[in-house]
Image (cartoon, grey):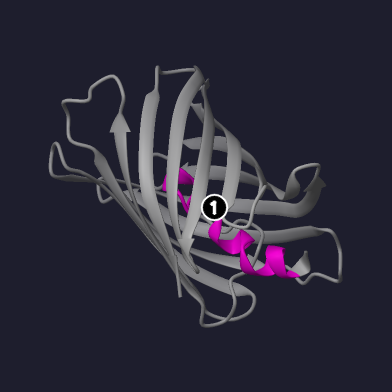
Amino acid sequence: MLRFFICVLPMLFASGDLAQAGAWPRDKGGAFLSGQARQNADTLDEAPVISVYGEYGLTDRWTIGGKLDYALASNDILQMKAFARWHLPNSDEPWQKAVSLAVEGTKDDPYVSPSFHLGRGIETAIGPGWLDIELTTTLSVLDAQMDYSAFAQIGVKPSQRLMTMVALDVTGIDADAQIDLIPSVAWEYKQGKHLQLEWTYALDGAVKHEVAAGIWLEF
């Protein structure tokens, strides 16, 4: 059980906008890389958005990484992100904790995003699982506008190779809220390599129906 959380959980949150290992640290010298194609289900004639994400365990407590979103339809970079995450010491407590700072956006609209991460392993009737929570404040560099977001994910590993997840992503945008429900599954086809499918549906805010497919690679 302990080996499951140490070895598997750091790769679970690296899909699309879930691209962080959350509260779980990556081993020193360990690397993770993911690629994903995201398609708007309402406009299947348009080219998808491609996301590439990577992170590296600089030390046992420091993880650094970055992400790039690229729109094939317009040949534009939609977003760039670089981050550093520090994992608080854990004295055999059930909750893992971490703080991170990201610089992201575009050259015309950069912003900084401090985050607090909280996570723990759970036991379910169908297998071991986890809970991951992230609270983020986003501050625009140009106009000092501030937004807040919260992300929570529950996952279960019902078999040796299958992982099932559901996430709720809440973002405050100009006093309005965007609330997205994100179910996903991942299948380990070879050790350290997963194929992942994801669906995003907006519960509130702008209409959103997106499907995504990706691959996760751990080194």
Depth check: give the residue in front, 147 or 22: 22
Front-most of 5 and 192? 192
Is residue 84 in view from this perspective?
A: yes
* Residue linked to disc 1: 13
| Position above or below: 217 against 138 | below
Q: Residue at x 50, y 49 (%)?
A: 186
Is 92 a magenta residue? no
Q: Main secondary structure of the magenta part?
A: helix
Crowdedness near tag 1: few (<14), some (14–19) or many (≥20) residues, C-alpha within 10 Å: some
Number of numbered tags placed on the structure image: 1
Q: Position of residue 120 (x, y in %)?
A: 76, 54
Residue 121 is left or right of residue 83, and the answer is right
The location of residue 117, given as percent across then percent down, is 66, 53
In this view of the protein, can residue 150 be seen by the observer?
no
Residue visible at 80% across and 69% down in the picture? 90
Q: Amino acid at mark 1?
A: Phe
Which quarter of the figure has residue 48? top left
- Taking the image as shown, residue 45 lies to the left or right of residue 169, namely left
The N terminus lies in quadrant: bottom right
Q: Is residue 4 magenta?
A: yes
Magenta span covers which residues?
3-19
